[in-house]
Image: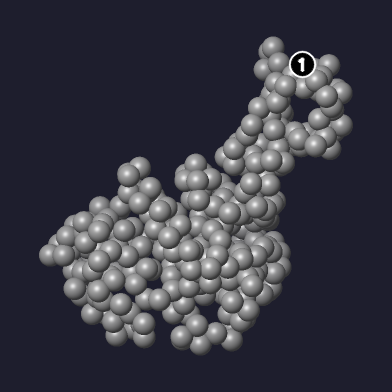
Amino acid sequence: MNALEIDRLTKRYSNFTLGEVSFCLPEGTIMGFIGENGAGKSTVINLITGAVKKDSGTIKIYGKNTEEMNKSDWEEIGTVIAECGFPSELRLQDVNSILKSIYKNWDESKFFYYTDRFSLNKKGRIKDYSSGMKMKLEIAIAFSHGAKILILDEATNGLDPSARLEILDMLMDFIQDERCAVLISSHIISDLEKICDYITFIHGGKILFSEEKDKLLEKYVVINADEKQIEELDKPAIVAMERTKWSTKAMVLKDMIPQGFETEKTNIEEIMLYHIKRGAK
């Protein structure tokens, strides 16, 4: 079963259009949601969580259309966004008291377990927290109300490498329950490559690919070639090229390379950048 299904989702603004976005997130998996600033990642996440109203298309969470979801259904979604939404004067105990009255499945002991694990100051006010500490607070909340699907928008921003690794490990533990799933956007593509089962790439408001990570890494390779070698390639095989004075570096479809070419393995960030380069032609 899919934890999340998005079909032909659209949203129009005066200066941006999200155009018929479609992808699925299976249960028991983590999907990395990648793209440049302004590509539409946060717009999609805001539409999923109901923070923004869609123009058209459907969003289903565990098979139920979001327009038909009740309060209990929404509580199964844990959301982490870049900005902390709590008043700056609050302390952790205040946050706990508020959320205990909102979430039916709020787990106070779990909340304070995570805030202790993240070394968040119980006596300090949110206004005294760094951006990284505020993000850890959001993550602690997301893990403390019985969510089955986590939606994280730049959740590792502002965290040092050790803290990022800890969050990634927590996400891996979370999906050991095969009913659970994670959608996470990040500019730190290397983090996503470590933990994600699927990668979805949005560019200019459109999905360019949504595939299993391992298949993506197997699908493309990079070659360094001269012009004569480039001419030997079928044009559909070439994703994009970078020309220098001495040679050409190109990303190509592995299955379409003639014998005799030396190839290099690629990574998710490189695949994304070459697709952006192709779109900029």
Residue that appears at 67% across and 53% down: 211
Tag 1 secondary structure: loop
For this view, does 280 lie left or right of residue 30? right
Q: Quadrant of the C terminus?
A: top right
Q: Name the spot of residue 236 as percent of width and height, x first.
A: 84, 37
Residue that appears at 69% across and 69% down: 7
Residue that appears at 50% across and 57% down: 184
Residue beneath disc 1: 226
For this view, does 266 lie left or right of residue 145? right
Outermost residue toward the top? 246
Q: Quadrant of the N terminus?
A: bottom right
Q: Is residue 122 above or below residue 265?
A: below
Picture quarter containing residue 28? bottom right
Residue 52 showing in the rendered view: no
Q: Is residue 260 above or below residue 100?
A: above
Q: Is residue 252 above or below residue 75?
A: above
For this view, does 240 lie left or right of residue 230? left
Q: Name the spot of residue 150 as percent of width and height, x first.
A: 47, 66
Picture quarter containing residue 257? top right
Picture quarter containing residue 245? top right
Q: Nearer the viewer, residue 186 or 175?
A: 175
Q: Name the spot of residue 4 as percent of width and height, x first.
A: 60, 70
Total tally of numbered discs in the picture: 1
Q: Nearer the viewer, residue 262 or 16?
A: 262
Way the structure is coloured = one colour
Q: Amino acid at mark 1?
A: Asp
Residue 249 showing in the rendered view: yes
Outermost residue toward the left? 123
Q: Name the spot of residue 196 as percent of width and height, x first.
A: 54, 52
Q: Nearer the viewer, residue 46 or 256?
A: 256
Residue that appears at 62% across and 76% down: 60
Q: Is residue 17 above or below residue 38?
A: below
